Amino acid sequence: MKFKARTMAVTLGLVGILAWRVAADNQPLFGEPFADLTTEQLNRFVAGREGFEEAETPADGLGPVFNGTSCAECHSGPAIGGDSNIVETRFGAITNAGFDPLSHLGGSLMQSQGIGLTGSCNFVGETVPPEATVVALRRTTPLFGLGLVDNVPDQALQLIALLQKKTSPATAGKPNVVKDTTGKMRVGKFGWKAQVATLHDFSGDAYLNEMGITNPDFPTENCPQGDCLLITACDPVSDPEDNGSGVQAFTDFMTFMAPPPRGPITAPVLAGERIFLRIGCANCHLPILVTGPSPVKALNKVVFRPFSDFLLHDMGELGDRIEQGRAKGREMRTAPLWGLRVRSNLLHDGSAASIEDAILAHAGQGQYARNRFNALNPTDVSALIAFLKSL
């Protein structure tokens, strides 16, 4: 990975301090770093953001099939590191043996773009093959505050799942236990199916699968539409295309990026939070988590409010039918609600244009809270929406 030279308003290596913008109540704004990082950590955040914004080319290893030329191309709203209304396509097939991701045909993630003519090969974007019986769309997810999530101990999420099983079995979640890049079985926290265990793995996975850039932990190119002979004949850059520095830079940027700032907390917002708790939304959208020990002060034993348990829940027909790790087709990770007020299209596929639409689409284990929402009087509905729009 290369880092292009940029003119920066403040160079941390020379000045040693950076005056980031903050909200009126001293919360870092969207996309800004934690307020209490060291100079060295701030430098890593800035370098990581540069890499995050950098557009890759085929000479850098982009492709041969890919979905974007930079991380920021999809993670841009309302600031670098956020989400977008860009949706990607996953596909597979339901067979007698279960879910088949159709890897031999380029699945389950479709790379929609190609680098074009390279030697004797013409690399073009993939399409959904006729063998696919499942096609799902997934929105880009926001990355704010994920360093906090990364530092929640696996045991904490497993304990939450056990407590839910005892106290609210009808809506209890389960962890998606997946293998990380070291071969260790871990609780997944990232992705719509909680299919990725750590921010480092999340970075390396995205570098390969979204931009086609191989790296030490993900060293094998995606074969376009499953045709590996094209890679053998015409892959223009030897693997791994990133020596690991790019993956580490992305990880640093996400690790040191502050969570979304909270909006004003008014009387209706406080009333709405009580309703949120009363009707059962918090059974899955758990308001508070706590990080474990960390050498980074901003991440060390911190209480934070993501409004998610990061567990899998059976969402009935709202599930996307894709299976990843131990996540079944009906199961989705609870989406964190922090930062909700700046999002437009909601749910995993962007199909909900409003908060009300998203609530009403809940099914499966989400049906209980949806039905209680339907029973609210207009005043309570207004208060609940005010609360959600404060997140």
Image: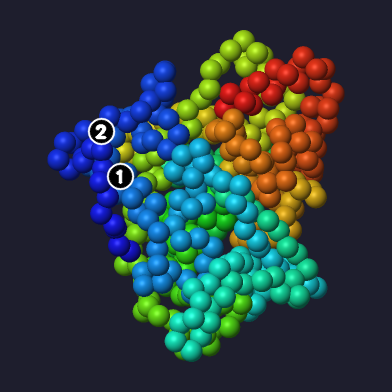
Q: What residue does disc 2 label?
A: 18
Q: What residue does disc 1 label?
A: 46
- 204 on left or right of 41: right
* Disc 1 element: helix
Q: Quadrant of the N terminus?
A: bottom left
* Disc 2 element: loop
Which residue sits at x=21%, y=33%? 17
Amino acid found under the numbered disc labelled 1: Val
Amino acid found under the numbered disc labelled 2: Leu
Q: Nearer the viewer, residue 348 or 86?
A: 86
Task: Give the image location of residue 110, x and y in percent.
Answer: 61, 67
Q: Earlier in the sequence, mark 1 or mark 2?
A: 2
Which residue sits at x=59%, y=30%? 341
Decide: is 285 above or below 155: above
Judge the density around disc 2: few (<14), some (14-19), many (≥20) Cα neighbours within 10 Å: some
Q: Quadrant of the C terminus?
A: top right
Q: Nearer the viewer, residue 4 or 264?
A: 4
Which residue sits at x=59%, y=71%? 125
Figure quadrant of residue 183: bottom left
Figure quadrant of residue 33: top left
Q: Nearer the viewer, residue 387 or 114?
A: 114
Decide: is 321 above or below 313: below
Which residue sits at x=76%, y=48%? 318
